[in-house]
Image (cartoon, helix red, strand yellow):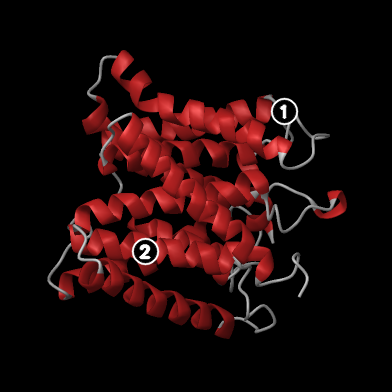
Amino acid sequence: MKLNRQPLRGLIPLLFVILSSVIFIFVADKVFDIGPGWQAIYALFFVWTAFVISLMGKWPLTKVKQPLVGIAFLIAALIIGILHPFVVEWLGYDKLSWAWPLISNLFLAVGIVVAFGNMFVEGLKQPASIAMNSLFMYIFAIITLLWIGMVPAIWFAFFVFVIFWMEGWPVQNMKQPAKGIMLMTIMGFFALILWYLFIEMDTHFFNPDAGLWFVIFVWWLVSTSWTLETWPLQKVKQPLKAIGGLVISVVLTFITYYVISDVLEMNLGDAGMYVWVFVSWLYSWDILFGKWPAERAPKVEKVKDQAEVAKK
């Protein structure tokens, strides 16, 4: 089996994701005495920065090959991402009370940029494009925070599902901005269903049990649809492909939840924070390194651009 074909094409980077996550957690805990909650906060700011970097199309390192380009962007994403809470504190705000709402709203801005095919900066070249994108996301996140408050990230799992498992079906051929509006509507619909399912299960999105289940669900949605590129269902047509992906992800989520809660008997709140670290590295690895080291040939090397995926 060739390394650049699924499932090895996805499983090999996945091993690096797990290793990177474990190192991140170990260093944060043992060297800097940072608990799981702040580890998750730093990791989520890091992955948001990685997404912003992906919109740059490898600029200004377009001629640099992997893994050097990935390492360079990884260092930049880690430094900029981890500095976020300190900047918030420097501006005179309580970094703990602002961190989670700001992260949640920034990711909502990410969803909007992707759903609308990055149309807000269409025609702009780098670095103007990335500057305007970043400005839009920051202003959107802060205004939303001041006006509404924290927008719960429960929609984010379905952002992954709708964009990558559903591949934008059934609105993939619509033009913008109608396509973006419909994609956000579909995501919101699914999010409401999950929200009420949690209520029926006598829990809440912000409770440790539901929070852990949700982040595990995100892990499996990203790893199956993005890292494994919907393998082994690549050739199945929509909507059966999306239904199959949802079933696989939900089953794996329940199995993983059972192992963490009943077999390992971990504290559910801490476990949820650790899984967010794993999710952050999972998402960031594909953004910054693509499928390296499984994919190393220059002719196929690329950094994942979510805005381009959203246009398909």
Q: Residue furthest left?
A: 202
Q: Nearer the viewer, residue 135 or 220?
A: 220
Would you say 69 lies left or right of 140 here?
right
**Gap between marks 1 and 2 measured at Cα:** 35 Å
Q: Mark 1 or 2 closer to N-term?
A: 1
* Percent of width and height locating residue 75: 57, 30
Choose top left, top right, bottom left or bottom right for residue 219: bottom left
Location of residue 94 in the rendering, given as x and y in whole percent from the top left corner:
22, 23
Q: Residue at x 21, y 54 (%)?
A: 269
Q: For label 1, count other residues whose C-alpha is less than 10 Å away and answer few (under 14), some (14-19) or many (20+).
A: few
* Residue 80 visible in the snapshot: yes
Residue 216 badge: 2
Q: Residue at x 20, y 65 (%)?
A: 265
Q: Which residue is mark 1?
A: 126
Residue 253 falls left or right of residue 165: left
Numbered disc 2: secondary structure = helix
**Residue type indicated by callout 1:** Gln
Residue at image location 63% in from the left, 33% down from the top: 73
The answer to which image quadrant residue 34 occupies is top left
- Amino acid beneath label 2: Ile
Q: Quadrant of residue 239?
A: bottom right
Q: Is residue 246 above or below residue 181?
A: below
Taking the view exactly as shown, the residue that stands out farthest to the right is 299
Quadrant holding the C terminus: bottom right
Q: Position of residue 35 (x, y in %)?
A: 25, 39
Mark 2, other Cα within 10 Å: few <14 / some 14–19 / many ≥20? many
